[in-house]
């Protein structure tokens, strides 16, 4: 089983979008049992809050639900519990490295690096552009899944955007 934790600042927009987009992809592929996928925050300001309504609506536009998800903060033990800890931006990466005492096993990665881009996922909290975030997260998740399961190559396209 491959265990993935997506991480952003508040765990109400980008990381839960990534969590539920990837969960949907593996479910549609019939490989959900091969994965454990979750998300968390680097900060405590949104703890216990649901997915932000515009992010929830963007997922719903694509038939993806996120009912029951509430924000939680990363914990030091997450490093041992997950195979990959995927940040949405450089600030997330720094916060994870501080929390985990570094990255001795090379588990920390930026989501967009899987798509060949060393940049942040567009942050809709500031831009209010949830479509741009959807496109980034969808591209990143497709590339992540293809890197983990080469047999999935070409199964998902940006038509999903």
Image (cartoon, rainbow, N blue to C red):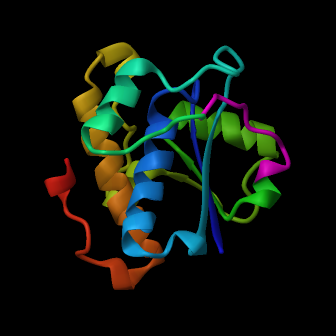
Q: Residue 30 at what x, y percent from top left?
A: 44, 75
For the N terminus, give its image quadrant: bottom right
Q: Residue 11 at what x, y percent from top left?
A: 57, 30
Residue at 67 percent of width and 33 percent of height: 95
Q: Is residue 104 left or right of residue 62?
A: right
Residue 52 visible, this orientation: yes
Q: Residue 5 at what x, y percent from top left?
A: 62, 51
User: Camera-side residue: 140 or 92?
Assistant: 140
Secondary structure mostly taken by the magenta-highlighted segment of the chain:
loop
Residue at 84 percent of width and 44 percent of height: 76
User: Camera-side residue: 20 or 112?
Assistant: 20
Residue at 59 percent of width and 73 percent of height: 33
User: Camera-side residue: 51 or 107?
Assistant: 51
Residue at 35 percent of width and 21 percent of height: 54
Q: Residue 70 at what x, y percent from top left?
A: 63, 29
Report if residue 36 lies within the magenta region.
Answer: no
Which range is magenta? 69-78
- Give the image quarter of residue 49: top right
């Amino acid at each position: 089983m491959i265990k993935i934790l997506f991480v952003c600042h508040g765990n109400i927009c980008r990381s839960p979008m990534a969590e539920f987009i990837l969960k949907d992809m593996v479910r549609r592929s019939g490989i959900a049992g091969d994965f454990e996928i979750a998300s968390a925050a680097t900060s405590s300001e949104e703890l216990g809050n649901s997915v932000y309504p515009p992010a929830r609506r963007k997922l719903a536009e694509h038939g993806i639900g996120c009912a029951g998800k509430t924000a939680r903060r990363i914990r030091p033990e997450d490093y041992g519990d997950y195979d990959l800890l995927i940040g949405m931006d450089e600030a997330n990466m720094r916060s994870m490295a501080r929390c985990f005492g570094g990255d001795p096993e090379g588990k920390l990665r930026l989501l967009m690096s899987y798509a060949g881009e060393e940049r942040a996922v567009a942050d809709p909290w500031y831009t209010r552009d949830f479509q741009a975030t959807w496109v980034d997260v969808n591209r990143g998740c497709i590339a992540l899944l293809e890197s983990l399961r080469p047999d999935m190559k070409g199964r998902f396209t940006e038509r999903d955007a």
